[in-house]
Image (spheres, coloured by chain):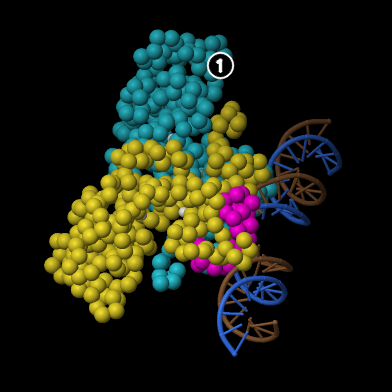
Chain colours: A cyan, B yellow, C brown, D blue
Amino acid sequence: MTIRDIHLRVPDSCRPKGARDHEKSPLTESIEEYVEGIWRLEQVIPTVGTGEIAQYMGVAPPSVTTMLKRMAELGLVEHIPYQGVRCTEKGEALALELLRKHRLIERLLVDFLELPWDGVHDLACKLEHYISSDVADRIAAAMGNPQTCPHGNPVDATRDDLSVQLSALEPGDRAWVAKITDEREEFLSYLYQIGLIPGAQIEAVGRTPFGDVLTLKVEGREEPVAIGREVMTSLWVHTGRFDRAPEGVVQATADPRT
Amino acid sequence: MTIRDIHLRVPDSCRPKGARDHEKSPLTESIEEYVEGIWRLEQVIPTVGTGEIAQYMGVAPPSVTTMLKRMAELGLVEHIPYQGVRCTEKGEALALELLRKHRLIERLLVDFLELPWDGVHDLACKLEHYISSDVADRIAAAMGNPQTCPHGNPVDATRDDLSVQLSALEPGDRAWVAKITDEREEFLSYLYQIGLIPGAQIEAVGRTPFGDVLTLKVEGREEPVAIGREVMTSLWVHTGRFDRAPEGVVQATADPRT
DNA sequence: CAGCGATTTTAGCCTAACCTAAAAACTGTT
DNA sequence: AACAGTTTTTAGGTTAGGCTAAAATCGCTG
Ligand SMILES: [Mn+2]
Ligand SMILES: [Mn+2]
Ligand SMILES: [Mn+2]
Ligand SMILES: [Mn+2]
């Protein structure tokens, strides 16, 4: 009875990085995070450059340049030096799959494990790199095929979405909260506190001259709240002025945790 | 409306390793895996040396030496060069917490997400490093505070356990499967196939002269199965000869997934 | 108690990521 | 068209965690 008979060994998938013989997947967590970030940036700015990526990733610009080279070699992005970068089809597919995993994980964490609505984004951002698509499918099935994350963002990021930014509202408009695109914990905490969660019914009651402050009534709350630019651009709503609720939209509930 | 207003940024906890300014937790996945491995080895062999760890981790011995130095500095192990290594209290506490997370995650994966019983070990081994103790607590609560992983190993590894190796059985003994300590996928697949899962009732019916092959009847199966040394040492059972079932033991079910 | 095989450590190297400082390239203005 | 400011890239360095080859130590046997 020697140690060999015990078959006590770490799984290959958990052997330390750098072990020469098990480099099956060349896609590291870092690379995935870059691809996801680049794709997200593409959705909001016309051309994505080294600088924006550096800011997004919280690293110095030279680190981005190096990484872009690696990613271009892997066929995830096209990079024209000094010009900018764009996801290839392959890169986009990876980004979309990561987004899907991220949002499904958030559902599991909030709805099943009852972790706080405003605190799951960071954990999901980590775990999204370590589950297979099959596991994501199982989460989707177990949670009843949710269409959005707990903050309203779509599991399938290619789906059209007719929501508009809160800043589009005029006094008198009624709408309901569709999604929140800034998922920083402190930001979400604040929104939770004032009741601005997906599904909440709101009514714009007033607006300052240059549109910098919007006053809202939130369903079930007495006091109207004053909304600044920051919330106005990160919070998206559905309003009868433009459309009917698209299918799959989160229905109004007092608490998204239930 | 510049990019700064979007607040699109990767969470600090997901920034790439190596970014100079966010080294809060010096405990890497690698270090955790080593600590866990060393503790596990301590349970089955008298003294743990560089060689055993190298085998367990699937790396070369010099890599272990380097790592042991780092771990000793962190106060996780005591290392006497050329002699061997032992977990400190701090190291043991970390190992036990990792084991707890691992086994709770397996429960979630098998019982809630319905992933295959024999395929979750590797994934749990990865995820165990990325969830906090609070999240582990939430999993425990959501799953009804399970006492063991789906393979029968205790969530609280300090708990005494009166099970014995299958090799202790004599012809005529009846027992039930308590736990399986070798969690390699192929090994578990085989056991699942022949019905040797935690809770299964068995009866030893015969034994070859030197004890190398044990013949068993498994509840609900017609054909007896022949068991070799490998299974005999990795499969532990409870038998009326020694004790009553300790509290918290998995009760017999036909399928541990249900 | 000397010698030899096995184990462990040291020495020196590699890769993925990061960093800072300096050079190069782009862009908009005179 | 030249220059200045900004952005990006190159150059050179660090760290964690691997690796191989060589040196050191251990433990056993003659
Ligand atoms: Mn992520
Ligand atoms: Mn979300
Ligand atoms: Mn692990
Ligand atoms: Mn298990």
Name the residue rendered at 66%, 49% in the picture.
Answer: A63
In the image, residue A150 sits, relative to residue A175, either above or below, namely below
For disc 1, the neighbor class at 10 Å (few under 14, some 14 to 19, many from 20) is some
Residue interval drawn in magenta: B51-79
**B45 with respect to B209 (left or right):** right
The spot of residue B104 in percent (x, y) is 37, 46
**A27 with respect to A242 (left or right):** right
The spot of residue B76 in percent (x, y) is 57, 51
Q: Is residue B73 magenta?
A: yes
Quick one: B256 or A225, which is closer to the camera?
B256
Q: What secondary structure is found at the residue carrying circle 1? A: loop
Chain for numbered disc 1: A
The disc labelled 1 sits on which kind of residue? Asp
Quick one: A51 or A226, which is closer to the camera?
A226
Name the residue rendered at 59%, 55% in the picture.
Answer: B78
Quick one: A31 or B197, which is closer to the camera?
B197
The spot of residue B127 in percent (x, y) is 44, 49
Name the residue rendered at 60%, 46% in the picture.
Answer: B26
> Which image quarter: residue C26?
top right
In the image, residue C1 sits, relative to residue C22, either above or below, namely below
Q: Is residue A82 magenta?
A: no
Name the residue rendered at 61%, 49% in the picture.
Answer: B74
Residue marked by disc 1: A212
The spot of residue B257 in percent (x, y) is 25, 51
In the image, residue A173 sits, relative to residue C13, either above or below, namely above
